[in-house]
Amino acid sequence: MLTEKRHEEIINLLDKKGSVTVQELKELFHTSESTIRRDLNVLHDKGVLMKVFGGAVQVESRIHTKEETVALKEEQNRSEKMRIAQYAAAMIQPNDFVYLDAGTTTGYMIPFLTEKSASFVTNAVSHALKLAENGFRVTLIGGEVKAATEAIVGNEAFANLLKYNFTKGFWGANGVSQTTGFTTPDINEAMIKECAMKRTQSPYVLCDSTKFHQIYPISFGDFSKSQILTDRLFDETYKRCKNVIVVP
């Protein structure tokens, strides 16, 4: 494969995944590690990507606007999301009052929940139904339904959340960055996320490794104000952050 074509494929892969490892690029292109590292050096110097230990990630200057459907998100990095969700579910203790944000990773928590004395509030229709079916006490906040993410949003939802004070909360995010915090494409959804997060004693953001260095138009929380649960980290900068937990 020509060098230019390989560079194009690397960029396309980063667009889809957000991060790549040297190992997976070696296997994809059937070439040597030294060749891949040269490719990454060239693309890094051009400002197309950011080299990190063991691979590369997208540059944070690029802002994404596209919102994927729930059906598509459910199939992306499924095993990693399940690991994160199982770890998060085990953090819920007796009598916790929990906010569960709309999203695929937070939804994956539900089959792993065992603490029946905990109560839940959510803005996700599907989450509320699954929680009720599994015998949990759950409140679905009122408001407008956003079809793409199956989330409840809008002024009524915002007003409903102002009544509550949560012991723990779990959120999804489209992007995670130290500079812009947690981001999402939609301002209405961001308002609900931010409101609930501010009313939570112990907030947790669940995100697989592809979400790091990703930036979407609307921020809903400061990076340092929440614990972050993820499956792995490429960037040494994030490895030094005390609020980032890599689940076993």
Image: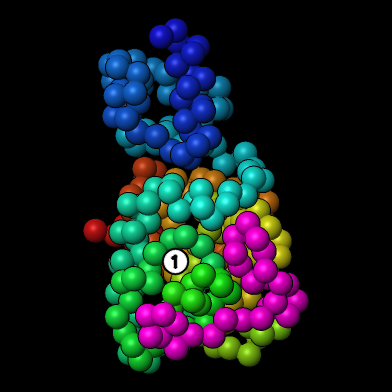
Q: Is residue 83 left or right of residue 106?
A: left
Which amino acid type is shown beneath numbered disc 1?
A: Gly
Q: Residue at x 38, y 72 (%)?
A: 110
Q: Residue furthest top?
A: 2
Asked whether 138 falls inside the magenta stretch, the response is: yes
Residue 87 in view (yes/no): yes
Q: Residue at x 38, y 69 (%)?
A: 109
Of residues 39 and 117, the one nearer the viewer is 117
Q: Residue furthest front?
A: 133
Q: Residue at x 44, y 47 (%)?
A: 76
Q: Indicate the position of residue 151 as horizontal and vertical percent values.
A: 61, 67
Query: Residue 134 appears in which quarter of the rendering?
Result: bottom left
Q: Which residues are magenta?
A: 132-158
Of residues 89 and 76, the one nearer the viewer is 76
Of residues 240 and 39, the one nearer the viewer is 39
Q: Secondary structure at mark 1?
A: helix
Q: Indicate the position of residue 59 as horizontal and vertical percent values.
A: 54, 37
Q: Residue furthest left?
A: 248
- Circle 1 packing at 10 Å, graded few (<14), some (14-19), many (20+), is many
In which quadrant will I find the C terminus? Answer: bottom left
Q: Indicate the position of residue 106 as horizontal and vertical percent values.
A: 44, 66
Query: Residue 168 appears in which quarter of the rendering?
Result: bottom left
Asked whether 68 falls inside the magenta stretch, the response is: no
In which quadrant will I find the N terminus? Answer: top left
Vertical order, 246 against 5 (above or below): below
Vertical order, 152 against 10 (above or below): below
Q: Residue at x 46, y 25 (%)?
A: 10
Residue 167 in view (yes/no): no
Residue beneath label 1, please? 107
Of residues 113 and 244, the one nearer the viewer is 113
